[in-house]
């Protein structure tokens, strides 16, 4: 990079910063959000958190129940993610430019992925709540619907990136479509795909809490219940459990990733 | 007797541009033929028309007395098992082992199911090791392909083509990504395929000297048309300039 382009870069970032400041100012003016007032409440809020969100002795009595709900939530997230992964594998193979069967199915797969991905998981919960009511199927379906889109998109990209050349070579040897997909494309992309699935398991365990609050299932429901009962000690314990779980899942999936990649 | 006959071949990807125009040539069994020409002349396109990796618009291609253009899906698969292909970027499955990649060349002879289950006969496995040994990479048989050098990967690519027991091998710039040393090894192997095994080779090349050194015959392609078809001996400097559409002097000035 020479001096001229560097100066240009500095110029660009300067203008970018200016635009950012103007936008911030404008949006706070429009929404009458006072930045200074907002900042001023922080110490008070912190104080409240530290004095109320404490894990007390008696809240530990609820621990078995919390862990049970937590396990239920984790298993639901894993089930939703893995089933979504299987569906996404088919959609990904159909949607990828290198392995598509025909244009219609490719567009169809991409369309499903795009719909699923562009509706946030919270919206999915609320939509499904109307038709399925408050039960664990709703939570499961909400996570499933949100995951299919993301994974399909990720799988399409992995396939396109990794296997175009070997698909060409195997087509030229006279291999059939399923031989090519099964013995060249999937072996090549599998580690990458597993990595995406693990990422989605992590994300979904986190999302499951929120989805649970909305659909009345799992740990999210427990959280919501104690929160409404103003029993903040138990709320703190639940939060702690979720944080520890997320960290453990994170460590496990990082380890698995290291082994397979 | 000619193994491959191309008559009046024409190809265009888009309506406004004709990539190949009225291509005519014949290749005899066991011949080693190079195709040279400037970038974008249509060398890769022409090679891919022969095994219909690219669908052509006009003319006829006869391979082994068979009309390539009129084959159905099953016939096309059968045709492709008889034609090996070697690529500039090797086109292996990098995460799989060398031996797995070589055995991929047998898929054309198997049902989908046999292929998916990886059922290979003893003879096929022996043949794979024999070929690896012949190309001097048998000690890498169980390594992953992404651990091999470019020259070694290209030899795996050649083994994959040879295990098809092809009558013809199409090579699209097999040495364009290799250093001079590895290039020589690869070209020597390709040459010995045609002399020892009697397999016909059709090779796209960028280096005129390499083409002159190895080929029985050279085809010069410029702007989608054959402008030269003769022996290395007949390829004079004047003819080379004609194929590449420039004089060497112009190249230096430009
Ligand atoms: N899939 C495609 N769709 C549209 N045009 C294409 C396609 N493939 C090749 N072409 C065009 O066809 C022409 C010939 O391409 P081709 O790859 O056959 O040339 P080449 O002689 O192999 O060149 P190079 O030496 O650079 O490999 C080029 O103008 C290219 O832009
Ligand atoms: Mg080319």
Image (cartoon, coloured by chain):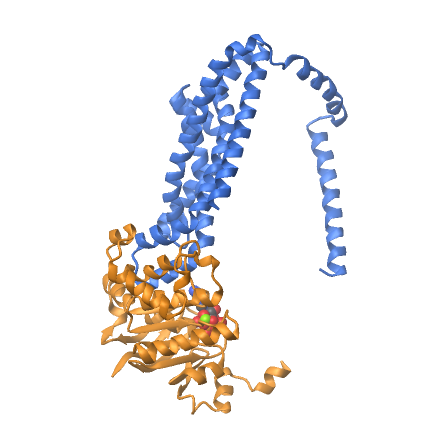
- Report the chain shown in blue: A
Q: In this view, does B65 lie above or below A187?
A: below
The answer to whether residue B199 is seen in the rendering is yes
Q: In this view, does B168 lie above or below A243?
A: below
Residue B4 x %, y %: 29, 78
Q: Which residue is drawn at 45% across and 74% down?
A: B185
* Apparent side of residue A61 relative to residue A3 in the rendered image (left or right): left
* Quadrant of the drawing holding the N terminus of chain A: bottom right
Residue A161 x %, y %: 47, 53
- Report the chain shown in orange: B
* Apparent side of residue A174 relative to residue B178 in the rendered image (left or right): left
* Residue sitting at the far top: A58
Q: In this view, does A87 lie above or below A61?
A: below
Q: Residue at x 49, y 83 (%)?
A: B209
Tell me how many marks there are: 0
* Residue sitting at the far front: B139
Q: Residue at x 25, y 51 (%)?
A: B113
Q: Residue at x 74, y 56 (%)?
A: A6
Q: In which quarter of the image is ligand 2?
A: bottom left
The answer to whether residue B57 is seen in the rendering is no
Residue B163 appears in which quarter of the rendering? Answer: bottom left
- The foreground one among A238 and B222 is A238
């Amino acid at each position: 990079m020479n001096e001229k382009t560097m100066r240009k870069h500095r110029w660009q970032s300067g203008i970018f910063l200016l635009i950012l400041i103007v936008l911030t100012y404008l949006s706070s003016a429009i929404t009458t959000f006072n930045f200074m007032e907002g900042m001023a409440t922080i110490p008070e809020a912190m104080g409240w958190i530290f004095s109320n969100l404490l894990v007390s002795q008696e809240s530990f009595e609820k621990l078995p129940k919390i862990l049970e709900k937590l396990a239920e939530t984790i298993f639901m997230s894993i089930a939703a993610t893995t089933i979504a992964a299987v569906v996404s594998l088919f959609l990904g193979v159909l949607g990828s430019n290198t392995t598509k069967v025909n244009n219609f199915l490719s567009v169809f797969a991409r369309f499903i992925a795009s719909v699923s991905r562009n509706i946030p998981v919270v919206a999915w919960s609320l939509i499904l709540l109307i038709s399925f009511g408050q039960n664990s199927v709703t939570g499961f379906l909400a996570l499933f619907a949100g995951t299919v889109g993301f994974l399909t998109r990720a799988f399409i990209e992995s396939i396109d990136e990794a296997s175009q050349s070997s698909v060409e070579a195997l087509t030229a040897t006279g291999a059939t479509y399923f031989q090519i997909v099964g013995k060249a494309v999937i072996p090549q992309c599998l580690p990458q795909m597993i990595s995406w699935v693990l990422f989605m398991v992590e994300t979904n365990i986190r999302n499951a809490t929120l989805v649970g609050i909305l659909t009345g299932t799992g740990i999210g429901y427990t959280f919501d219940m104690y929160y409404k009962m103003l029993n903040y000690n138990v709320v703190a314990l639940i939060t702690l459990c979720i944080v520890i779980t997320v960290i453990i899942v994170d460590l496990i999936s990082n380890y698995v990733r290291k082994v397979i990649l | 007797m000619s193994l491959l006959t191309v008559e009046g071949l024409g190809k265009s990807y888009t309506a406004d541009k004709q990539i190949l125009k009225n291509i005519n040539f014949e290749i005899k069994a066991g011949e080693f033929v190079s195709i040279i020409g400037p970038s974008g002349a249509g060398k890769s396109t022409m090679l891919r028309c022969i095994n219909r990796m690219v669908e052509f618009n006009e003319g006829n291609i006869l391979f082994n007395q068979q009309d390539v253009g009129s084959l159905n899906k099953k016939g096309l698969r059968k045709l492709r098992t008889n034609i090996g292909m070697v690529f500039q970027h090797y086109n292996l499955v990098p995460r799989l082992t060398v031996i797995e990649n070589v055995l991929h060349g047998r898929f054309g002879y198997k049902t989908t199911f046999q292929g998916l289950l990886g059922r290979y006969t003893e003879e096929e496995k022996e043949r794979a090791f024999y070929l690896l040994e012949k190309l001097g990479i048998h000690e890498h048989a169980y390594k992953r392909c992404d651990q091999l050098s470019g020259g070694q990967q290209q030899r795996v690519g050649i083994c994959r083509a040879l295990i098809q027991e092809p009558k013809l091998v199409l090579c699209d710039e097999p040495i364009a990504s290799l250093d001079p040393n590895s290039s020589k090894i690869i070209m020597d192997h390709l040459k010995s395929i045609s002399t020892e095994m009697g397999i016909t080779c059709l090779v796209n090349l960028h280096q005129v000297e390499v083409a002159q050194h190895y080929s029985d015959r050279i085809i010069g392609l410029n702007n989608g048309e054959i402008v030269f078809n003769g022996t290395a001996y007949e390829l004079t400097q004047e003819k080379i300039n004609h194929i590449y559409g420039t004089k060497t002097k112009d190249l230096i000035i430009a």
